[in-house]
């Protein structure tokens, strides 16, 4: 049962959810009904319409802006089907600038915002990227905000001028690249089927050289993929300072039209083993007092910080809370993955936001039967990726059990290996976490 406290103070009435640090303002009549036992305090949280949430305001901090729903590659596992999401085209200036206004207007007291250029292949619309960046620079001054930029690209269009532009504006760059020739050419060919590895590799290397390796590789693994360490080592050798591998989430289209499938049970077990080795490696570095630079971006760094500071994470990701996906035509979605699926459209950049996004702001850790009782809930945040839940189970609230199994293993591994550290190891770890990863 929740620990709810009823509070009357100087003519105002509140319900305070102590465990979840949520404050709700209520009308005096509702307060009186609780006092006279007409209604139980424990029954009022679901009566959302009677509660004005004070502490739970969630502001928008980042948007994925689909400046190009077209692509020059034809990746077999692309959930947007050739990056088009059923709405082929490039974003026009009107929608692009309104999207920035929408971000700023809904950002409340947040000072630092981020625009992530997405697609398709966003660099196919570099003129619009430049227009948006210039507009953000204008707007950030007027609104006292700092707007950072990010891009998720396939790397095919890197050249001297683009590299310089992305570096000058300090873009956070994620490059989708599958790690070796065989895998990249199979999964990520050009339109028409020609392999892309030989063309992209030198471009990525030049780009990485231009910014001291500061970019992240995102490799997708499928049923055909090899050992994860093989990819990780390849990407490191190429010069990436950070990389992550992500099991594929396939649309029905991909399943039906490409010789590609989700990772097998055996591969999932290997993924668990891979995670275990990561924390083992991290903590053996701690024992040897080596620096932890290689673990920048590792989930374990985050979990360790949470563990040590006893922080409760109550959201898996920012879907529909701090983030939105904006389609090429100005439609708004809970996140970039839902773009193009009309069931999930929550508004438009040019009309007033009517709060439709709240439907996707689900409090899994407190309300979902499985998450409520899960020992790892405050590391996971609850629910997992709701897009994944939807693709796998047809329902955003039906959990992807593979996620839960992996999450439980990750946290158990964290507990085990942390318990193997002595007091001096722990002091070294805390010091590294505070100074290098704050
Ligand atoms: S691991 Fe699974 S059950 Fe546990 S909180 Fe996350 S989604 Fe819920
Ligand atoms: S719902 Fe899934 S795809 Fe969307 S932001 Fe969350 S984790 Fe990412």
Image (cartoon, rainbow, N blue to C red):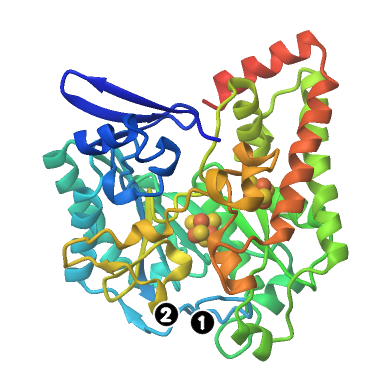
- At 40% across and 36% down in the image, what residue appears? 41
Looking at the image, residue 225 sits to the left or right of residue 133; the answer is right
In front: 381, or 28? 28
Residue 381 point in image, percent of width and height:
57, 43
Would residue 19 be seen by someone viewing this image from the given angle? yes
Query: In x, y percent, where is residue 269?
Result: 85, 56
The reply to whether the C-beta atoms of the residues labelled 1 and 2 are less than 8 Å apart is yes
**SS for dot 1:** loop
- For mark 2, does the 10 Å Cα neighbourhood hold few (<14), some (14 to 19), or many (20 or more) residues? many
Tell me the residue that label 2 is attached to. Answer: 70
Total marks placed? 2
**Quarter of the figure with residue 281:** top right
Q: Residue at x 48, y 48 (%)?
A: 363
Q: Is residue 313 above or below residue 194?
A: above
Residue at position x 48%, y 67% in the image: 337
State which quarter of the image contains the N terminus: top right
Residue under label 1: 82
> Can residue 316 be spotted in the picture?
no
Residue furthest to the left in view is 142
Horizontal arrangement in the rendering, residue 358 relative to residue 237 (left or right): left
Identify whether 402 is placed above or below 301: below
The image quarter in which residue 305 lies? top right
For label 2, the SS is loop
> Residue shown at 51%/34% (left/top)?
2
| Mark identifier at residue 392 | none
Image side of residue 360 versus residue 89, left or right:
right
Q: Is residue 335 above or below residue 86?
A: above
The answer to which of marks 1 and 2 sits earlier in the sequence is 2
Tell me which corner region of the image, top left, top right, bottom left or bottom right, holds residue 109.
top left
Question: Where in the figure is residue 78, as x and y percent of width and height?
Answer: 57, 76
């Amino acid at each position: 049962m929740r620990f709810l406290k009823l509070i009357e103070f100087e003519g105002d009435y509140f319900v305070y959810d102590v465990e979840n640090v949520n404050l709700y303002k209520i009308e005096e009549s509702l307060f009186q009904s609780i006092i006279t036992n007409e209604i139980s305090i424990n029954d009022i949280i679901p009566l959302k319409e009677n509660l004005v949430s004070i502490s739970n305001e969630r502001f928008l901090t980042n948007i994925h802006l689909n400046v190009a729903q077209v692509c020059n590659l034809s990746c077999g596992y692309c959930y947007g089907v050739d990056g088009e999401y059923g709405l082929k085209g490039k974003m026009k200036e009107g929608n692009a600038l309104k999207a920035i206004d929408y971000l700023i207007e809904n950002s409340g007291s947040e000072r630092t915002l981020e625009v992530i250029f997405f697609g398709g292949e966003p660099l196919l619309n570099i003129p619009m990227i430049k227009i948006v960046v210039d507009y953000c620079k204008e707007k950030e001054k007027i609104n006292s905000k700092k707007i950072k930029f990010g891009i998720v690209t396939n790397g095919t269009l890197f050249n001297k001028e683009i590299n310089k532009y992305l570096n000058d504006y300090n873009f956070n760059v994620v490059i989708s690249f599958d790690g070796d020739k065989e895998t990249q050419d199979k999964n990520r060919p050009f339109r028409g089927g020609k392999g892309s590895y030989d063309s992209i590799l030198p471009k990525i290397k030049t780009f990485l050289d231009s910014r001291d390796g500061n970019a992240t590789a995102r490799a997708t693994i499928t049923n055909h993929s090899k050992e994860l360490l093989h990819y990780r080592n390849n990407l490191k050798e190429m010069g990436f300072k950070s990389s992550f591998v992500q099991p594929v989430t396939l649309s029905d289209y991909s399943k039906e039209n490409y010789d590609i499938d989700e990772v097998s049970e055996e591969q999932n077990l290997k993924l668990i083993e891979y995670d275990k080795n990561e924390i083992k490696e991290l903590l053996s570095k701690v024992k040897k007092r080596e620096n932890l630079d290689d673990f920048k971006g590792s989930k374990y760094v985050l979990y360790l910080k949470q563990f040590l500071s006893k922080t409760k994470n109550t959201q898996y990701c920012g879907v529909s809370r701090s983030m939105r996906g904006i389609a090429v035509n100005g439609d708004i979605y809970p996140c970039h993955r839902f773009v193009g699926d009309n069931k999930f459209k929550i508004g438009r950049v040019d009309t007033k936001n009517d709060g439709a996004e709240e439907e996707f702001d689900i409090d899994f850790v407190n309300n979902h039967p499985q998450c409520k009782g899960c020992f790892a809930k405050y590391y996971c945040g609850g629910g997992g990726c709701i897009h994944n839940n939807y693709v796998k189970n047809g329902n955003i609230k039906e959990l992807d059990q593979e996620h839960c199994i992996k999450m439980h293993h990750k946290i158990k591994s964290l507990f085990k290996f942390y318990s193997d550290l002595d007091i001096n190891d722990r002091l070294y770890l805390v010091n590294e976490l505070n100074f290098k990863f704050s």
